[in-house]
Amino acid sequence: MRNTYNKFIFGDMSAIRRHGIKSFEDNYFWPISDVEFDKFVRHMHNSYIELISNIDDDYLYDIALIELNFVHYLIQVFHYNYVQEYAKENKIKLLVGDDSSIYRNPDWTQLGVFYSTLEFPFGKIIRFIRRIVKNIYFNKHLSVVEILKGFFHKDKIINIGSMNFIKMEFIRKRKIFVKYCDWIDVIDLKNKESTIQNNNSLFFKENIVSIFLSNIGDNGNLFVKNIDFLELEKSWTQRFNDLSNLYYSLIDVDSEVDTLLVSDMAKPIPKLITMSFQRKKIDVFCFHHGNDACYSKLSLASESTICHSRKFITPTKGINNRYKKHYLNNVIAKRSNIKFISINSNYYTKLFSKRNYINNSNVNKIMLMGFPLNSHRYSYENNLFFYKMISLEYRIIIALKEAGYHVLYKVHPDREQEAKGIFNNFVDEYIPKPFENTWQKADLLLFTYTSTTTFGHALTTNLPIVLIDSAKKSRDIDDYELMRSRINILPAKVDDKMKIKFNKGSLINIISNDAINNFDFSYVDQILGKQ
């Protein structure tokens, strides 16, 4: 995409906070089109999957699959490299700050020693206290006597990661005692390097790192221009070496554990523990994060986040069936032989019963769901990038205020810093608190994307919902039609300047006349209901 008039590129939210949203709108331009970015992402992802799929050794395959996370980090580095190189070539000033530094200035040395410099934020004493508290809380379905017995028995069933209602219900239904562990209690960080692991390091360098980077580097485009591939290769080879040490230390250690429960499973360390325990024939259950409306097909994301597991626990049959339909047959899932298992929870059914709909035809307060405005350009659904979304949100807010509505901006709770001060002078209320505690403030909920747990939770409320949807190609067409009975969908398109365009008049008309009429919960019950 060529720039013919802009003198600036706003490179991250740091620049927008510094110069203001109006200045950003006046200089709206991003040099990498959706088509070009999507093509590059798929090339990187699929090239890596093809390489590691040829590995016959299961241990080496596991280690390589864990590092798919690093491939997706490199995508972001190369994305920002394109922007920087484009700005240089076209003599355009790139306005940036700390928000995008992690991608613009990768420290290959630090990235290389990631696995050998792991640290846990708490010391032994605090971890000991945490374990006691969490072991009591996680096992509160048992009697006091059973809990005390569990403390002194050997660790047969352990849990790592956070606890949500799915995992709690799984434990309660099985009437089991589960011991909480921090990951540092499971991994031996002092394991020394062996000859076998040295050989493995050479294998990864010659068969994965060098081939993959050569394939990417040969493109010769702005994504990779002036990237120091020698330093990158050195860094990545070191990562593989250190990761191999950790993996084999987990494989080699004798363990009395027969069941492992895992959440936050997409992160490298839980993924490492999951895959090594699975290879040791330990029963590993990985848990869905909950509140998933299953409205988008996220194929690339599934391969890097969930398909390494063998037993994936979902809350409802509806979610379970969608996951089977969308992800069961990808190449990673097939090799893992993943099984999707529903606990048939009635959690959402209980939410429905608490929220009987009361028809309120007077829509005044509208809650706009803020996008997480970090510098990551997500590849699994159209337009999930701060540059597009902050512009869209600004124009929505202006349209709503001009129409006389009271606007509540629901900032993403994990990304309050990025959005700080951007819309304070434009909206009536700025809400950083969790959605579950604040949705009752609104008469109507307005979304611009659906790959968020907030959307799934919102479907269970008694409020009308409007979706400005620019990602129809990511939808299952049958689900798209069924979803229209619960929410009001306003189609949006991306113009040649990469702006998400919507019809303001249609938006106001939907809010004024149609929004309160869409309360058929067929889709919601099909996905989130007990069935």
Image: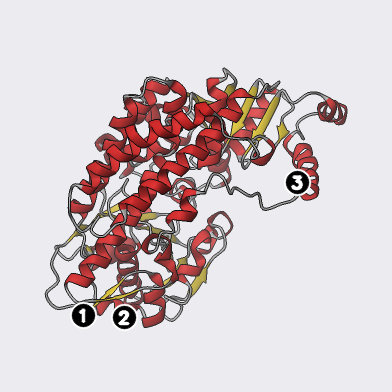
- Residue that carries the numbered disc 2 in the rendered image: 22
Instruction: Calculate the distance from the C-alpha at mark 3 to the C-alpha at mark 2.
Output: 48 Å
Q: Which of 107 and 487 is in front in this view?
A: 107
Label 1 CA crowd tier, 10 Å (few <14, some 14–19, many 20+): some
Q: Which colour scheme is used?
A: secondary structure
**Is 335 placed left or right of 265 in the picture?**
left
- Residue type for callout 3: Arg
**Is 246 placed left or right of 419 in the picture?**
right
- Residue type for callout 2: Lys
Residue at position x 38%, y 42% from top? 520
Compared with 320, 507 (above or below) is below
Nearest to N terminus: mark 3 or mark 2: 2
- Residue that carries the numbered disc 3 in the rendered image: 127
* Discs 1, 3 touching: Cβ within 8 Å: no
Q: Nearer the viewer, residue 4 or 497?
A: 4
In percent of width and height, residue 276 lies at: 54, 27
Q: Which of 22 and 106 is in front in this view?
A: 106
Instruction: Calculate the distance from the C-alpha at mark 1 to the C-alpha at mark 3.
Output: 52 Å
Q: Which secondary structure, mark 3?
A: helix
**Is 216 placed left or right of 280 in the picture?**
left
Q: Is residue 45 shown to the viewer in this render?
A: no
Nearest to N terminus: mark 1 or mark 3: 1
Q: Which secondary structure, mark 1?
A: loop
**Is 67 placed left or right of 80 in the picture?**
right
- Residue that carries the numbered disc 1 in the rendered image: 7
